[in-house]
Image (spheres, coloured by chain):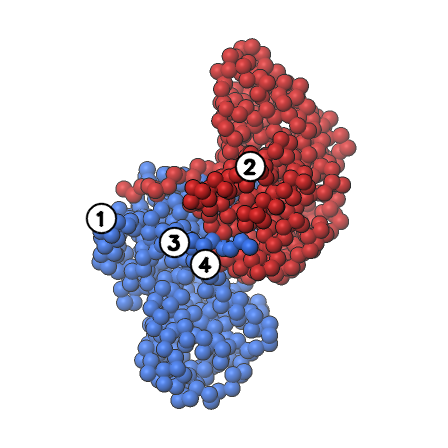
Chain colours: A blue, B red
Amino acid sequence: MPVLNPSARPVPLSPTLAINEAIAHKRREGKPVLALGFGEAGIPIHPALTRELAGAADRGAYGPVAGSAALREAAAGYWGRRGLPTDPDLVVCGPGSKPLLFALMTALGGEIAIPAPSWVSYAAQAAITGAGAVPVATPPGEGGVPNPALLADAVVRARAAGRAIRAVVVTLPDNPTGTLASEGTVRRLCAVAREHDLVIISDEIYRDLLHDPARAVPSPAAFAPERTVVTTALSKSLAAGGWRLGVARLPEGRFGRELRDGLLGIASELWSSAPAPMQHAAAYAFGEPSELVGHIDRSRRLHAAVTGAVARRFAEAGARVREPEAAFYVYPDFAPLRDHLREAHGVRTGAELCTLLLDRYGVGVLPASAFGEPADALRMRVATSLLYGDTDEQRLTALADADPVSLPWIASGLNRLTEVLADLKAASGHTLAPALAG
Amino acid sequence: MPVLNPSARPVPLSPTLAINEAIAHKRREGKPVLALGFGEAGIPIHPALTRELAGAADRGAYGPVAGSAALREAAAGYWGRRGLPTDPDLVVCGPGSKPLLFALMTALGGEIAIPAPSWVSYAAQAAITGAGAVPVATPPGEGGVPNPALLADAVVRARAAGRAIRAVVVTLPDNPTGTLASEGTVRRLCAVAREHDLVIISDEIYRDLLHDPARAVPSPAAFAPERTVVTTALSKSLAAGGWRLGVARLPEGRFGRELRDGLLGIASELWSSAPAPMQHAAAYAFGEPSELVGHIDRSRRLHAAVTGAVARRFAEAGARVREPEAAFYVYPDFAPLRDHLREAHGVRTGAELCTLLLDRYGVGVLPASAFGEPADALRMRVATSLLYGDTDEQRLTALADADPVSLPWIASGLNRLTEVLADLKAASGHTLAPALAG
């Protein structure tokens, strides 16, 4: 019988998607769950966006690999309004930013430096290209950007060993930590990239979900425009992950044009084009009509309120946790409870802690190790967005409410979380019935 | 400045998509074109399918990597009705069959044997995985299936050289030749695959466009079910290429389950899931409601009528050409005119012949070399489907007409083709004004 690729380790299901499916499975079995694992925005698609997609449902032609002119112009305008003037010819669309990132890594070749921790798929994609990723720790409180001095060290060490790091990924704002690196750190990273001739891939999919809308996102495209690729998508701020629509903004100048040709070649052989009806809806979205801008404002406020409340619950339980600054993620650290967790629950690793939370309490979160951190780190990513409701009616109510954490279903989820964390702190860990919340 | 991947040749734009864009460019410049290059089905999306997509436009969640249960069950039913009973758990959906094929090659590892000629993307995808493709000539008149004896030789030679061919791709019916291999050839290929432990990837995207609907498609999944993957999509029979929706049917048994896990891991890191609204519409389509079955019947008749007429025009001009059996492709060979083409036009290669046709006459076709044939082969792939009309009204009229080749716009395209081919045969090649037809 045939066997799978003997020369490569099989790629396991992406942890974020795996936890989503594990929780859906538990739910189908009628078990109570608190779904905090998956990075889905947890709000309904805005009706204006649905209307645009429905109106373009008869578009069956492939269209250009780079995407329609209307979409590329709209995306250029979107970036232009954020201080990044953009040539529409340097915009490339794809079926999500995930395949765009993979195609970029493939076109660039060589190893990719990534932040540690960072989104699960950067390292997995770099492994699939065959080149691999080099994790570089981020400065404290500045998730998403490798410490520039450590990055320089890593590049030099790799070169001394005959390997080439050719690009560095940054996430602004960050998933999994929900923080935003400072402009100073980003500028220092750009200087290192310039010195060592690295391409910067700046994943800015959470840009519009920075909780303080007055705060600026320091994009490396502003400081190193000749070498920075920016990616974004409809998946997070507009909650259209299932639509599969992303865009990349390539660097200016000769290298940017070469990279565009390389990227389009790979795109043409990997996916042909992004779905045509979604391209039409995305052109509308990137035009930023006021109804969508208001919708994103409301979702940003909802994310801020609930992540703040979740962070406080973890802090009250004794975990170390920063105030979330962006998106719908909290990244608590149970290091202060390490001895207790070992003694009361036999838990020594983050994965064991998350398995305990899922199996005993139905709480689905992802361990730091899924994001490239050491196995014994007791940190975890908590995605808050599936707390917003089980129905679109609940989610829309949460979006509109000035104090969403007081809504009964959100309060209930938060209270269940408090109970679980309290039980975890109790000596034996067996005092709480496993099936309280629905 | 950074440079592109120095260790790999850049991937050029896929030739089929490149000719599509070149022709669109000429058309925008107001130049007359006869677009015969791109494998788009050339008919409007059926209104029932549009209605299903529009009705699912509010689906923004990612959903399972493998695809929705409804879609997997519908696809299983589709294959079941074609003599291939299918477990829905062994169906995996993706954003087109193109990314599914790439992910399969990545999961399998090793070199891939492909038919020569074959669809442009098999070899390009195998190159992107890093392993590469081994072209194996097809038997005369049986495009899409490598000659089984030559395949066995290639596997043995590769092993002797320390390389491993781990899979073989077949296309049933075939693109670019528009022919269908015989059951005997497919059975012999299956025997070779079993003897040498190869996985068979059977691209059956044109299955429902076999011109004689009474004829059976000999799928290797029927003869070697333990090692055959079948792929198909909505792109050709339902003309929804721009929707990006494909499905794969994995082998039965232990290997099939392992391959499913491997494929899902790669899919989860490359594209997350196929677009959710399209999954809903695809579930409807694979259910084969009578309105869509009738639509596919009509499109099959249209393809048969026009490919037949186009083949006759080439034959009348002195090219060698088989009667097309499937899809919307004709694959004429100008070998009988080789001396004349060299003397009158300085043409020695298929690429030169196609460039002459495009530059002088605005006729866009793809040379055999794009499909892996030798540079001096004077064959070309002629895609007929963009002759059906410039508007949806024309295309729908063509679909409904009992004698579509008599419709003025189709007759005009065919007559322009006859003129061009006659001019090509004329001594100097300069007798025909370049800008006759629109």
Which chain's residue wears label 3? A
Task: Please tell me if label 1 and label 3 are on a single chain.
Answer: yes
Q: Position of residue A1 (x, y in %)?
A: 55, 55
Q: Which mark is residue A11?
A: 4
Q: Quadrant of residue A92?
A: top left
Q: Nearer the viewer, mark 2 or mark 3?
A: 2
Q: Which residue is mark 3?
A: A126
The disc labelled 3 sits on which kind of residue? Ala
Number of other residues with Cα within 10 Å of mark 2, as a class: few under 14, some 14 to 19, many 20 or more:
some
Q: Nearer the viewer, mark 1 or mark 3?
A: 3
* CA distance separating discs 2 and 4: 33 Å
Q: Closer to the camera, A92 or B330?
A: B330
Residue A183 horizontal side relative to residue B382, left or right: left
* CA distance separating discs 4 and 3: 11 Å
Residue B379 horizontal side relative to residue A372, left or right: right
Which comes before the other along the chain, label 1 or label 3? 3
Task: Please tell me if label 2 and label 3 are on a single chain.
Answer: no
Q: Which residue is mark 1?
A: A195
Labels 2 and 3 touching (C-beta < 8 A): no
* CA distance separating discs 1 and 4: 34 Å
